[in-house]
Image: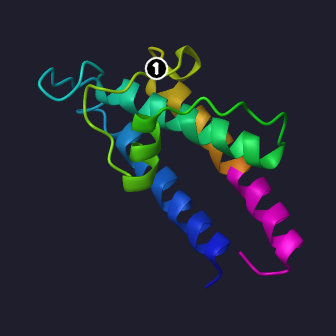
Amino acid sequence: MPFAARQVQQLRALIDEIDGLARNESQFALRREAVSNWSVAEQLDHAVRVCSSILAGIHEPGETLPRRLNWIGRMVLATGYIPRGRGRSPKSMLPMPCSREELGTSVSEVRSLLARVASSQASESNDPI
């Protein structure tokens, strides 16, 4: 399986998992202060916002951003490890209070964006995704 196809498949699985968690009414508002100040709903909203932003950037690339990544950011990217409670999200990625229905709508939008990205990647590489 080509690299891009594998990544799309993994992202689809992640979106399905987020959608499943968003439908779980009993844990949607759960918050564990020892782990995070964000509730499950806020964590899911943050994850959906990040996915949407990344996919939008892939689908319609704009200006390249200046390289302002410090050494800690480089280590996070190199290792894939994000220390809890240390990182700060940009204001645009901070979660907003939302209902399960609103989160479901956001997940649907991310799914359609992923489908567009996957089809454009497949047409560029002539590989089935």
Residue 107, x across and y down, in percent: 57, 40
Query: In the current view of this chain or complex, which residue is farthest to the left?
Result: 34
Please state, as top left, top right, bottom left or bottom right, where the C terminus lies in the image: bottom right
Q: Is residue 59 left or right of residue 17?
A: right
Q: Is residue 122 magenta?
A: yes
Quadrant in which the N terminus appears? bottom right
* Horizontal side, residue 14 vs residue 120: left or right: left
Residue for point 72% across, 49% down: 112
121 left or right, relative to 78 = right
Examine the rendered structure and indicate whether residue 87 appears above or below residue 116. Answer: above
Q: Amino acid at mark 1?
A: Pro
Give the main secondary structure, helix, strand or loop, of the magenta stretch.
helix
On the image, the x and y values in percent for residue 89 come to: 46, 23
SS class of the residue under badge 1? loop
Residue 100 among those drawn in magenta: no
Percent of width and height locating residue 8: 61, 64
Q: Which residues are magenta?
A: 114-129
Q: Which residue is mark 1?
A: 95
Q: Is residue 70 left or right of residue 120?
A: left
Residue 95 vs residue 100, the one in the foreground: 95
Q: Residues within 10 Å of mark 1 (few under 14, many from 20)?
A: some
Q: Quadrant of residue 53?
A: top right
Q: Residue furthest bottom?
A: 1
Above or below 52: residue 16:
below
Q: Nearer the viewer, residue 35 or 82?
A: 82
Measuring 75% from the left and 48% from the top, which residue is drawn there?
58
Residue 117 appears at what percent x and percent y? Answer: 76, 56
At 51% from the left edge and 51% from the top edge, which residue is drawn? Answer: 15
